[in-house]
Image (tube, grey):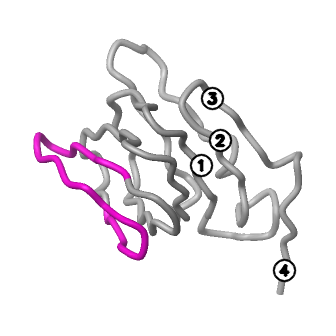
Amino acid sequence: MHVITASPDHVTTTPNATMTGLAAPSRGSSELSTWHVDMPAGATGPEHSVTREQVWTLTTGSLEVTCEGRTETVAAGRTLVLPAGAVRRIHAPEDFRAHVAMRADGVVSVAGEEEPRILPWAR
């Protein structure tokens, strides 16, 4: 059993959001990673795909996600399942927080970037 305490050492801030790593292999999980995403109103992440399924549960606010050409609004209290390999983009019409779960070995591909991105908060 591992009890994980949030730490400033597990926080990654990008131009679009802040990710706070929770469970991950570096913190005792063998298969899964979980984290919080905090995105401010008006922010939009890059169009990308992830090699693993992700489950996003909105805890505050709402987000707009475009996935495989379809756009949905997801509000607090709802859960979004994004399939592996699906091209998606997340937009914050208002501040939101989401709890995300994924297999720990997922990597991200962003259009126009040669190398995939490793998610440091998920490792």
Q: Which of 75 and 57 is in front in this view?
A: 75
Task: Determine the residue positioned at 63% across, 29% down.
Answer: 14
Which is nearer the N-term, disc 1 or disc 3? 3
Asked which secondary structure carries label 4, the reply is loop
Which is nearer the N-term, disc 1 or disc 4? 4
Give me the disc on residue 14: 3
Q: Are marks 2 and 1 in contact (CB under 8 Å)?
A: yes
Task: Determine the residue positioned at 31% across, 53% down.
Answer: 84
Eye-nearest disc, 2 or 4: 2
Image side of residue 116 versus residue 25, left or right:
left
Residue under label 1: 38
CA distance for labels 2 and 3: 6 Å
**Label 3 crowd (10 A; few <14 / some 14-19 / many >=20):** few
Eye-nearest disc, 1 or 4: 1
Residue 17 point in image, percent of width and height: 58, 37
CA distance for labels 1 and 4: 25 Å
**Label 2 crowd (10 A; few <14 / some 14-19 / many >=20):** some
Magenta residues? 63-81
Quadrant of the rendered structure where residue 30 is? bottom right
Eye-nearest disc, 1 or 3: 1
Residue under label 2: 18
Amino acid, disc 1: Asp
CA distance for labels 2 and 1: 5 Å
Asked which secondary structure carries label 1, the reply is strand
Q: Are marks 2 and 3 in contact (CB under 8 Å)?
A: yes
Task: Determine the residue positioned at 81% across, 49% down.
Answer: 10
Q: Do the residues labelled 1 and 4 touch (CB within 8 Å)?
A: no
Residue 84 included in the magenta stretch of the image: no
Residue under label 4: 2
CA distance for labels 1 and 3: 11 Å
Residue 77 point in image, percent of width and height: 41, 76
Amino acid, disc 3: Thr
